[in-house]
Amino acid sequence: MITSRSRRPARRPRGRTTARLAVAGVLAATAAALPVPTAQAAGSVVKVTGSQGAWQLTVDGAPYTVKGLTWGPSVADAGRYMPDVKSMGVNTIRTWGTDATTKPLLDSAAENGIKVIAGFWLQPGGGPGSGGCVNYLTDTGYKNDMLAEFPKWVEAYKDHEGVLMWNVGNESVLGLQNCYSGDELERQRDAYTTFVNEIAKKIHAVDPNHPVTSTDAWTGAWPYYKKNAPDLDLYAVNSYDAVCDIRATWESGGYDKPYIVTEGGPAGEWEVPDDANGIPDEPTDVAKAEGYQRAWDCVNGHQGVSLGATLFHYGTEYDFGGVWFNLLPAGQKRLSYYAVKEAYGADTSGDNTPPVISGMTVDNASAVEAGKPFTFRASVSDPDGDALTHQVLVNSKYIDDSGQLTEADFTDRGDGTFEVTAPDKLGVWKVYLKSTDGKGNVGIETKSFTVVPPKVDGVNLASGKPAEASSFQPDSVGCPCPAANAVDGSFDTRWASEWADQQWIQVDLGATTSFDHVQLAWEAAYAKAYTVQTSDNGQDWNTVHTETAGNGGIDDIPVTGNARYVRVSTSERGTPWGYSLYEFGVYRR
């Protein structure tokens, strides 16, 4: 069984799966429509040779250690990036899907003396969002389809010089825990690894000249492969911060096959401690670079058993996950890029190196007022003395699961101090400082900050007063969510309406009272169009403010009124959901 130590929670940078699914996702859409390519008859003979604890990988009889990277760019960009990959001392790339579109990638790799660990995707592929759940005990249709599909592409490419080995599945032993539990989970894991063995036998029958492996997360999957998949030539594992523990678990597990690491690098989002704002504390650029070197040292140190690694990730995506893991986000090289290059023995003596950012801190990081300026500080230097330019970006992943980085308005004070305008959506954000040297290199550092409502002078007349709404959600996430939640003074509770446009929420101030400010703190489900209305009797309403282009977050409305009842009447939703307010404040200064 996979131990609790090796189980990883579902939270993982989206960038980790972007490249994998971009490849895997084309299988169903394109494979049936495109002809099977004809590969040149010049393939290598790749073998796992040796005996217990003294194995090696050979290519045409010569020893071969996998010095690799996982591959992120599109097949169309292979010719552009493959020479750079070669310059890093890389001899292998890993993919997650193989189909009719793969040949140009294999061609480009072979032209540059690089070989490919060619992947085949199996559901659930690491968890939710990666292909859905399969019942490996009963779904003979799916299994038969894969048993026919994968050998077809093995036949197409088995004689291609670019092929190193075949890799069946990715983290499905782990991912099945998102589909099943208890005894059924154990049965499914046994069934899945037994099916992987069936595929391995099919592939071997078609291609006896290239090994077959199967990747999972951490070594907790290996007992299942040991029991159910004897036809695998070697094991494969994705492991990040725990990569240096692989040797001990291999030795204690009594395994009789070597392994490769098919993803590895610095600590992932699921492995680091939370920061003061309660979110994973992303390692610095310096720490990430050290993480790649450490990973390779541990992989390379298990001689005779570890046959190498494809570290994660030669990717250019420039988003939350891309900044966490990619060696060259937006095509710009960072410290990690050069750390891998040095680890693989390539010459770095003439390289211009990236800017180094250290000591980044955010002032008052637990209470940054929405829409107001805040300050962060960092020490930025360039080892080569290059002139630097800076950019500040923000990300809302821990609010709405967005991976996008958005440019922020900022002022560079020139002494390592940057003043930024905060977003107006409540919750924990990340701010990124990106420093570039004009020579193709970048340093990126990030810290979190919590956006809170801006303070309003005066008394909140609505606090704790009776509230009503046209509807509320009794059993949604975090609910029941009645109208009273919007006037209870807590941003841990909310009012949430049903999913329909025409909704309202109102507060009874208890007596006719003058006020001069309304503050609406929207949760993710906000109103694009609404009015603020007042009434003395709760029946006849007077509109005192109209909004037609709301964007959520905090709405601070300077509006005067003299009434007992104040209502927000919505007409158009800004999301597919209903409306949701953390707080509805009515103030008198």
Image: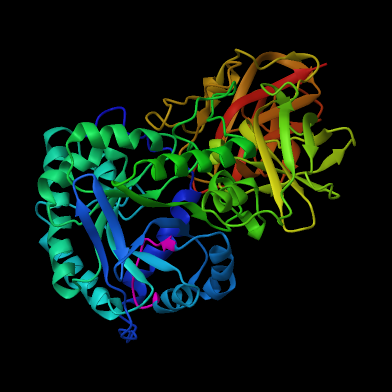
Pinpoint residue 385: horizontal percent, then vertical percent: 84, 46
Could you tell me residue 172's position as x and y percent?
Answer: 27, 48
Please provide the residue range marked out in magenta.
92-102
Residue 539 is left or right of residue 212, and the answer is right
Left or right? Give the position of 53 relative to 554: left
For the question of whether residue 579 can be seen, the reply is no
In the rendered picture of this protein, how many numbered marks are placed on residues? 0
259 horizontally vs 428: left or right: left
User: In front here: 560 or 14?
Assistant: 14
Q: Position of residue 24 (x, y in %)?
A: 37, 63
Residue at (33, 85) in percent of width and height: 37
Please tell me in which quadrant of the rendered image residue 163 appears.
bottom left
Camera-side residue: 508 or 365? 365
Q: Is residue 94 above or below residue 157?
A: above
Residue 580 shows up from this direction: yes
Q: Main secondary structure of the magenta part?
A: loop
Q: Depth check: 72 or 475 in front?
A: 72
437 with respect to 327 (left or right): right
For the N terminus, which image quadrant?
A: top left
| Residue pictured at 46% horizontal, 44% vertical | 296
In the image, residue 512 lies in the stretch drawn in magenta = no
What colour scheme does the image use?
rainbow
Q: Which corner quadrant of the image does residue 505 belong to? A: top right
Who is closer to the viewer here, 17 or 233?
Answer: 233
In this rendering, the answer to whether 52 lies above or below 347 is above
Quarter of the C terminus within the rendering: top right
Residue 562 versus residue 405 in the image, above or below: above
- Residue 300 coordinates in the image, percent (x, y): 41, 45
**Residue at 23% over, 76% down:** 152
